[in-house]
Structures are given as C-alpha cells and as structure tokens.
Image (cartoon, rainbow, N blue to C red):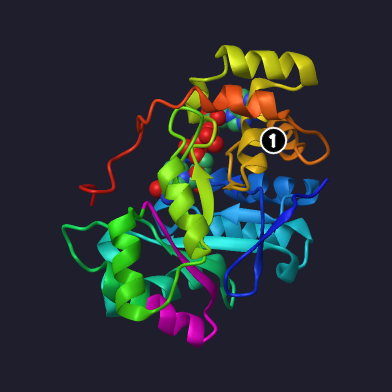
Amino acid sequence: MQANRLRLNDGRSIPQLGLGLWQIPAETTAEVVAQALRMGYRLLDGAAAYGNEEGLGQGLRDSGVPRDEVFVTTKVWNSDQGYDQTLRAVEASLARLGVEQVDLCLIHWPAPAQDLYVDSWRALIRLREEGRVRSIGVSNFLPAHLDRIVDQTGVVPVLNQVELNPRLQQAGLRALHDSLGIVTQSWTPLGQGRSFDAEPIRAAAQRTGRSPAQVILRWHVQLGLSVIPRSTRAAGQAENLDLFDWELTEEEMAAIATLDEGCRSGPDPAVFG
Ligand code: NAD
C-alpha cells in the first residue's frame, strides 16, 4: 500500500504519510528506512538534529527504491540559522545524506530570540533557485513568524510541520495554513499514546476493527494533514501505513474533535531556541 499525495503550493506534491526519524539510533537507521521503503513508505522525515542523516541516505540506497520515487525532508537546526550558516548547513546535510538535492528543507524552529529566521528563509529561497532543495518550508512557526517571512520575501512556505494530535488540534493554525495554501504536517501525531484509551478513539477502533493508533492517524489523514509517525518495527510501520482504504464517520471525527485540550507536550515555539 502507498499513501495518497497532497499538492504543495509550488506545484509539487508530498505523500500524505511518512516515516518520522527522530530518536532512531544512527546505527539502525539504514535498516529501518530500507524496511519502510520496501513496504511502500515514500516520505522520510529527517533532520540534521536527529544525527542519523547518513543512515537515512544509506537506507535509501539499500532499499532499491529509485531516488526520484522517495520524498526526503531535512531541517536546519537552530544553531545553523542565519544566511551563510543555513547555506553551509544544507550542503552538509546533502553530503551526509549522499544526495544531490532534498525534496523539502524546513527551518526546524523559528528560535525568535536569535531573530535569524528571515535570513535563514532567504537562504532556503536561494537553495531552491540553485536546485539543492526542491521545496522549502518551516516547522514550529506561529502565525507571527509566518506573516513575517511572507511579508519580507513574498515566498509562502509549502508546509509548516507542527505538534498536532487529538489533544492539541491547532484549529486556528490549520485555518491560517488553509488560507495561505500551506500544508499542515503533524509531528508527534500519536500524542505519546495519551489518547489511546479515550472513549471516541476506543469506540472508533472497535467499530472499524483498527488499532487506536490507526484511528488517530486516519483522523489526521481525514483532516487533510500530512502525518509522520515513527515506528521502527515492521509490524508497526505496516499498521501505520494501512490508512487509505477505510474511513471514520463524520460522527467519529466530531467525537475526536472534543478531545482537544490545547496543551503542548513539546517546547513552546514562542520561546524555544
Ligand atoms: P509519534 O507520535 O510518531 O510516536 C512515536 C511513538 O509511538 C514511539 O514510541 C512508537 O513506538 C509508538 N508507535 C508508533 N506506531 C505505533 C502504533 N501503531 N501503535 C502503538 N504505538 C506506536 O512521535 P514522534 O516520533 O515524536 O513524532 C513523529 C515524527 O515527527 C518524529 O519522528 C520526527 O520525524 C517528527 N518530529 C518533528 C519535530 C519538530 O520539531 N519538527 C518534533 C518532534 C517530532
């Protein structure tokens, strides 16, 4: 099975579901990535800060899946922000990955206290013009950060990758993204399992014969989001990919909407970095 694709505002497209690579040990990453690609995954969510870009690139080559069929994301870490630093950081990521270009490069956090994210964004625009990066986007950007880069450069990110799960549904940010043509991509989409036992999740799991994790991931898919769950086990990866030939009802979607608490488990982008 393969995931549906979502259109990006630069004319390209991204698989709706991918494999998250945070906290996957460097020494096992190649194996985990190759396994996922052979199973049908076509989106890999990497980052310089994850310390496993070499393994990502090795897994890509080991899998036998052609490079142009796989969508590779990387991210520029906070300590590499700034125009020249970002140019250098992306070249270093490309070298570690062993690829000529990545499909998507994100600014990992706005890190507003450094006040360098506009310069970093200008560097990504240049890297896109030079063909080192196909599409450019951001992560953990709040509305004020999005407004500022769009105002100052006229270039709208294709995607904003943010913490999003049933307990943190980000309805306001999703509406802003929709109005700007930005894809919303959910990180920590399973919310550390905290909603697995919630009644709307359990009821939908029972009706569909699916797991709580699948119900939550299907909820993301049905909201039109891109989602990047992390699983190293083949069975878990297969379960998380099996989302595209069944549906939640409108009532089930509405019931899951009631679980929103607006609470982050990760850092606050207004102050982090
Ligand atoms: P996740 O929501 O994907 O959850 C991962 C945990 O859930 C793991 O413990 C895994 O074993 C378990 N799990 C996975 N599939 C399961 C299943 N079917 N049933 C039961 N348990 C299951 O959390 P995550 O890794 O924090 O987030 C996903 C990805 O998002 C990361 O790997 C990374 O690529 C990205 N991310 C980005 C940022 C950012 O700042 N941009 C921050 C955090 C994560």
Mark 1, residues whose alpha carbon is within 10 Å: few (<14), some, or many (≥20)?
many
Residue 51 seen in the current view? no
- Percent across and percent down for residue 27 are 54, 46
Residue identifier under label 1: 240
In the drawing, does residue 181 fall left or right of residue 252?
left
Q: Position of residue 271 (x, y in %)?
A: 20, 47
Q: Is residue 128 magenta?
A: yes
Q: Residue furthest bottom?
A: 130
Provide the secondary structure element on which disc 1 rests.
Answer: helix
Compared across the picture, whether 126 is left or right of 240 comes to left
Please tell me whether residue 190 is drawn above or below residue 89 in the rendered image: above
Query: What amino acid does circle 1 point to?
Result: Asn
Residue 29 pos. (x, y %) = 58, 47
Which range is magenta?
A: 123-140
Pick the front one: 238 or 256: 256
Image quadrant holding the N terminus, namely top right
Res 18 visible? yes
Image point 68% across, 35% down: which residue?
Answer: 218
Magenta stretch encompasses residue 253: no
230 shown above or below 207: below
Which residue lies at the image location 50% right of the left edge and 33% below the top edge?
165
Task: Indicate left or right for 133 with 264 as reference.
Answer: right
